[in-house]
Amino acid sequence: MSNRRLLRPSVLVVLTGLALAAAPQARADEPNHRRIYNALWEMEKARDELRAEKGDLGGHREKAVELLDAAIRQTERALREGRVEVRREPFEEHVYGRYRHHPHAHHVLLAIKDARADLRDARHIPEREREQALRDLERAEHEVEEAVRFLR
């Protein structure tokens, strides 16, 4: 009987320790989509900047806007299919200090690269939706890069 009394607190301590050790691990395993949320925000802002631009940016403005729209839609769809909340998170204002003009059109190139890296690793998002989002992001990135060359 006395052995059982000694075992009860020991088992309780061990179980409590296991629960505490597992809790931070579970949080660390949760996917972090902040860079994807940042890219969604940045793609919308870049799209708005390009739409407001008067010139055709070497013939790339309209196509860049169209491909940004497609990338936004497909990224949102991929997140929804992966049962992930769709939202936007802005960057902190200081990230735009390096750009003399059209900060979103310039910075979206970095944001898309980061989002693509995170999407590649997001195995909880169905492959078909994830791969389409990656293709759409790549196409938008390329076209925006071409359009940015003509911005002044």
Image (spheres, rainbow, N blue to C red):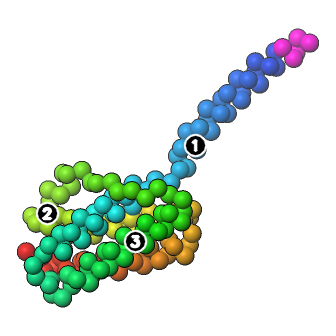
**Percent position (x, y) of residue 47?**
24, 71
Quote the CA–CA distance across marks 1 and 2: 39 Å
- Kind of residue at badge 3: Arg
Q: Nearer the viewer, residue 45 or 106?
A: 45
Task: Judge whether residue 28 is colored magenta.
Answer: no
Q: Residues within 10 Å of mark 3 (few under 14, many from 20)?
A: some
* Mark 2, residue position: 99
User: Could you say whether the residue bearing mark 3 is in a helix, strand or loop?
Assistant: helix
- Kind of residue at badge 1: Gln
In front of the other: label 2 or label 3? 3
Q: Residues within 10 Å of mark 1 (few under 14, many from 20)?
A: few
Q: Which is nearer the N-term, disc 1 or disc 2?
A: 1
Q: Residues within 10 Å of mark 2 (few under 14, many from 20)?
A: few
**Residue furthest top as drawn:** 2
Magenta-drawn stretch, dominant element (helix, strand or loop): helix
Q: Nearer the viewer, residue 91 or 6?
A: 91
Q: Residue at position x 50%, y 54% from top?
A: 31
Q: Residue at position x 62%, y 39% from top?
A: 22
Q: Which is nearer the N-term, disc 2 or disc 3?
A: 3
Q: How many numbered circles does the render carry?
A: 3
**Residue furthest bottom as drawn:** 59
- Kind of residue at badge 2: Tyr
Q: Which contiguous range is marked in magenta?
A: 1-5
Q: In the image, which disc is placed on residue 47?
A: none
* Mark 3, residue position: 73
* Mark 1, residue position: 25
The reply to whether callout 1 and callout 2 are in contact (CB within 8 Å) is no
Whether residue 127 sits left or right of residue 10 in the image: it is left
**Percent position (x, y) of residue 131?**
49, 75
**Viewport quadrant of the N terminus:** top right
User: Could you say whether the residue bearing mark 2 is in a helix, strand or loop?
Assistant: loop
Quote the CA–CA distance across marks 2 and 3: 27 Å
